[in-house]
Amino acid sequence: MYEALERELKWEVDEQFVLPRLDDVVKGADVRHTTLQLTSSYYDTADGDLEAHGVLLRRRDGDDDVGWQLKVPDADGRVEIHTALSDAPPSELTEMLTGMRLGKPLVNIATIRTVRDRYRITEPKHDRVCIEVDVDQVRASVEDRLLAWREVEVELGPKAKSVPSKLTDRLTRSGARPARYSSKLARAAHVERPGRTVDSPAVAAITDYLDSQIDQIFAGDLGLRRGSDPIHDTRVAIRRLRSTLRVFGKLMEPTAIEGIEDELKWFAGLLGEVRDRQVQRRRFGEALAKLPPERVLGPVANRIDNDLHSDQLQARQQVSEVMDTPRYLTLLATLQRWRSKPPTAAGISVKDLGKRARRAERKADQRLADGIDSGDDALLHRGRKAAKRARYAAELRLPLDATAKRTVKYYKQFQRVLGDHQDGAVASETLLRLGRMAGTTEGENGFTFGILYAQEQQAAAEAKRKVAELLR
């Protein structure tokens, strides 16, 4: 299995289209032409769950690039994950897609055959492809429908930054039009679906915000199954989703959101166990590196890294196991339904959103003040969580109220400072535990852990001072 980044643009063309001159698009480059026969069999659930997230799974047969290909959206294009050819979708890909497909089976939904005239513009010096231009004659079979069309794909080579304007201009003058569909499958299987009914700008603001967080959670699911580390971004999306339910829950259908906040909290807690260890390993490593050597007594770095890494691996394994349970997949299924049928009540107004958001701001202000006045860490933590909710409520209202930008900025300051305070509080407990273990283990010493603990306490006091200044 290997991965590659795909960056391409697509154009629609008619039968009379003639490909313009390519030999001078890149200075000094060669153009190599070949003709290929390709067959792609696409797989999805019967409900189109992969397509809903812009994910494609296909089996490619023919003259080139034979095997299974999974295409996943990426900030710079799409990541293509390739595996060897087999009769059925390979287990390494189906397991990777468990969350995206909500545990449902994959079925063949379309077969597309392409005659491709491929033109590769290469640099002779490096024998490296700069740009590939493909003119495709396409025939598609979807259920009982047969379709045919022509299109042009322009794919960038690894070192290319963008499609040359000279090529774009020539394609346009030759009659090419920017494609309406993101892929051949999207065009072949396109069914006109009724758009979501949005009865007010307020409903649109809520649904758009919910959709953004749900997309991030599903992207995080796929990333975790691929072995990458989207834990922080996934936790933030879950926080935003929970915050929206807490602040604006009265404006939603009770039966649609019942119990979901608890389920989100449950999964976020599991991710938090992994994230805490990641943050602490980095935090303690940086603090240890700043200490004079004479203050580092015993194998402190080994104790920190080995213990925390072991805890992190166990927590990560628990996350992996949970992600295959019916409880987790049911949560994802609910979030997927929200994308097509938002849980908002009818008749929500912009005024309703503002009223709920201002209530969240007042609660945050009061809890922050109570935490500073009392000096109680638990109250400060409650104030931090309330500040997050106020910030996220303001984020949701940004399309409706320009002044919400100031509110976001204001509460983000508290969130950042109190985040450091909370990290320090959790870190202090961990250092106490590690220090006790080191102090009672032959060949080790708890002295350095005491220094690190004192530094965390000092940082916590500084965070409280900064919060007090912000409140004033």
Image (tube, rainbow, N blue to C red):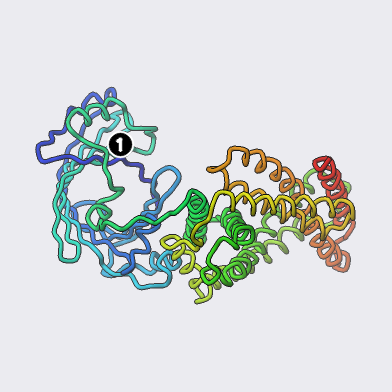
Give above or below for 402 relative to 270: above
Q: Position of residue 468 (x, y in %)?
A: 85, 44
> Viewed as shown, does residue 157 lie left or right of 380?
left
Identify which residue is drawn at 72% across, 55% down.
Answer: 386
Identify which residue is drawn at 13% across, 36% down.
Answer: 17
Q: Quadrant of residue 66?
A: bottom left
Residue 292 shows up from this direction: no
Assign the N terminus to one quadrant of the image.
Answer: bottom left
Identify which residue is drawn at 57% across, 43% down.
Answer: 398
Marks counted in the figure total 1
Instruction: Say which of 79 and 243 sits in front.
Output: 243
Give above or below for 92 relative to 456: below
- Residue beneath label 1, please? 129
Q: Position of residue 51 (x, y in %)?
A: 35, 59
Q: Quadrant of residue 378?
A: bottom right
Give above or below for 465 relative to 48: above
> Viewed as shown, does residue 347 lie left or right of 430?
left
Instruction: Say which of 398 and 99 sits in front.
Output: 398
Instruction: Say which of 215 and 245 sits in front.
Output: 245
Q: Position of residue 237 (x, y in %)?
A: 57, 55
Give above or below for 74 relative to 49: above
Assign the C terminus to one quadrant of the image.
Answer: top right
Q: Position of residue 320 (x, y in %)?
A: 54, 69
